[in-house]
Image (tube, grey):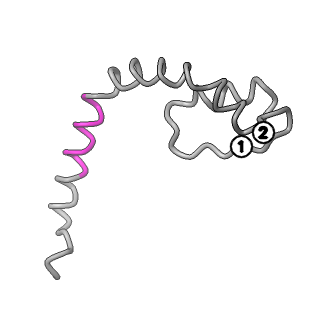
Amino acid sequence: MSPTELSNSDAERLRAFERQGHDALAKSYHAFFAAVTALATNPLFDAVHLHPGTRLLDVASGPGALTAAAANRGAR
């Protein structure tokens, strides 16, 4: 094994560590960023000229509030 490779047990320990951190922060992350996202939603849609029929790709942009708002404005 090269120095940059993880053993299976090390990789599983890393996954467990990351999962524990994500789980610990999930509620506070959502509570904080939902409000921030809500403030930015309309200015963002205006900046990209979002209109009914606009095709939108959501990649890792949070829990889906932005995508739901875009769908409510007719985006696909």
| 76 sits left or right of 16 in the view | right
The magenta region covers 15-24
Q: How many labels does the image show?
A: 2
Image position of 27 with respect to 17: above or below? above
Question: Which residue is the site of mark 2?
Answer: 76
Task: Please state which of residues 65 and 41 is positioned toward the viewer in this rendering.
Answer: 41
Image quarter where the N terminus lies is: bottom left
Residue extending farthest to the bottom is: 2
Within 10 Å of disc 2 (Cα), the crowding (few <14, some 14-19, many 20+) is some
Which residue type does callout 1 highlight? Leu
Assign the magenta stretch its main secondary structure: helix
Which residue type does callout 2 highlight? Arg
Secondary structure under tag 2 reads loop
Image quarter where the C terminus lies is: top right
Distance of label 1 from label 2 (alpha carbons): 6 Å
Magenta-colored stretch includes residue 23: yes
Could you tell me which residue is drawn at 74 percent across and 29 percent down? 71
Picture coordinates of residue 26, whole percent (x, y): 34, 27
| 5 sits left or right of 67 in the view | left
Label 2 near label 1: C-beta < 8 Å?
yes
Question: Which residue is the site of mark 1?
Answer: 56
Residue extending farthest to the right is: 53
Picture coordinates of residue 56, whole percent (x, y): 71, 43
Could you tell me which residue is drawn at 25 percent across and 45 percent down? 18
Task: Please state which of residues 47 and 22 is positioned toward the viewer in this rendering.
Answer: 47
Magenta-colored stretch includes residue 22: yes
Task: Please state which of residues 73 and 23 is positioned toward the viewer in this rendering.
Answer: 73
Could you tell me which residue is drawn at 21 percent across and 60 percent down? 11
Secondary structure under tag 1 reads loop
